[in-house]
Amino acid sequence: MTNPGKTIAAISTPAGKGGIGIVRVSGPAVPEITQAFFGYPLKSRQARLHAFKDVQGETLDRGIALYFEAPNSYTGEDVLELQAHGGPVLLDLLLQRILALGAVPAAPGEFTERAFLNHKIDLTQAEAVADLIESSSEQAVRAAARSLEGRFSKTVNELLSQLTYLRTYIEAALDFPEEEIDFLNDTTLREKLDQLREKISETLQATRVGFLLKEGMKVVILGLPNAGKSRLLNRLAGRDAAIVTDIAGTTRDVLREHIHIDGLPLHIVDTAGLRDNAGIVEQEGIKRAWREVETADRVFLLIDDCIGMTPADRKIMSELPGGVRVDIIYNKLDISGRSPYIKEAADHTELGLSAHTGAGIDLLTRYLKTAIGAEQTMENTVIARRRHIEALLAVQKHADIAKQQLEAGAGELAAEELSQAQSKLSSITGEFSSDELLGQIFSSFCIGK
């Protein structure tokens, strides 16, 4: 904690001019600061109009003052909020007055950090505060709100409860080996473990959708030279971000565009054309293209519809790393004469369009919205971060190994794997989290939050 035991203060509204601005104060000295600032105490949770005066007693403004007595406040401490007119100079004068009365400037995220440390919210809810503020779409807002109200925490705690039951069951069997019943081979135990693994998988899927809503999906466009990759990038970006010519190998480096489709974030990466007889500069561009694929959520393999799928295109597909979703896009339908289309397959989607005329781009954008998760059922989707996904992947791995150990009759090893899974799950809500992790999370907040 940055200022343990201190009373902190900050302007909680964004920088700039506005109709209303808020100065927030939290800590043990709030009652004394309130008495010194107003000359009288305030009743808890009552909004009243007050004069805000400087040290000489001159009125700076008249506004609403709200006092929240601990523990019934956002931070769990005594809190004072001064709601004044939103002029930056005025708010700074009010803040300086509060600091002169004994408060210290709040660090970024310190109000929310105190709420976490005082058990008003858990770590996923604390992160949801920042995510709600930064949301760029309705879906992201609703997903962040679900996290803030504790739905993600509830899911994690349900998983923890299932893990605790399984560990207790296995360890009891190990502690009482003289019992005639073989508890470790009980079908109920195996069924419960399978149910847990299924629940982990469902949670991981919902978390991945939530991550894409927050961070955006990274799409890498691959293909042979002159397939129309740069033209597709320009069409999606809505501007001439990349140079387009009829000369093969025009793009020799990685080009990135961050765009929004109905508010949903998308990272589009254009790459150099992939071919074997490339020059030195193109070879470096091709190496960079493959490095981008390693961190891609999805790959668009662009194919010239006038030529069709070639052995070189199939070679590119065969060299893609496992786990990366690849979709095939047949471009230049304005030349081949075919109509735009979209066709679903088991492991990929095939689209036909014209990046030159824009025909079929609407099919592609709708498909991208579906891929991000915008058109899925959102009831269970929560805003998630990479650390949540990494933790759940580790939990999934430990649960899978626990099943293998249980089937092999190694109860002690199965119990240890479930213990490791418990620790990873607990790190999501902050029950077991390092100070370094907490510092990274709260330092990313704005001052006053």
Image: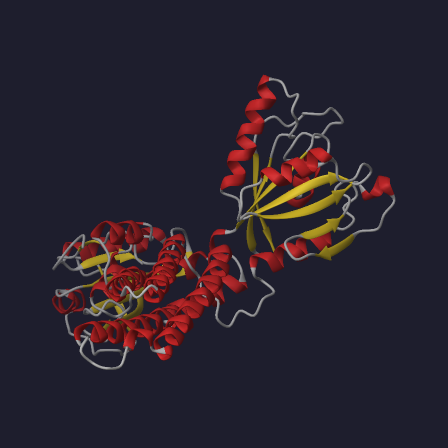
Q: In this view, does 448 lie to the left or right of 265?
A: left
Query: For the image shown, how many numbered marks are present on the structure?
Result: 0
Q: Is residue 174 left or right of residue 287?
A: left
The quadrant of the rendering that contains the N terminus is bottom left
Q: In this view, does 343 lie to the left or right of 348?
A: right
Image-quadrant location for residue 272: top right
Instruction: Write the residue at 37% across / 75% down.
Output: 192
Q: Is residue 93 above or below residue 167?
A: above
Front one among 231 and 443: 231
Q: Position of residue 197 (x, y in %)?
A: 41, 67
Q: Where is residue 324 in the image (x, y as percent from the top left)?
A: 55, 47
Front one among 442 and 273: 273
Q: Can residue 149 be seen in this view?
A: no
Image-quadrant location for residue 53: bottom left
Q: Is residue 434 visible?
A: yes
Spot the residue most to the top: 280
Q: In this view, does 177 lie above or below 416?
A: below
Q: Where is residue 95 in the image (x, y as percent from the top left)?
A: 24, 55
The quadrant of the rendering that contains the C terminus is bottom left
Instruction: Write the residue at 32% across / 68% down.
Output: 63
Front one among 107 and 68: 107
Spot the residue most to the bottom: 180
Spot the residue most to the right: 337
The image's colour scheme reads secondary structure
Q: Position of residue 38 (x, y in %)?
A: 18, 68
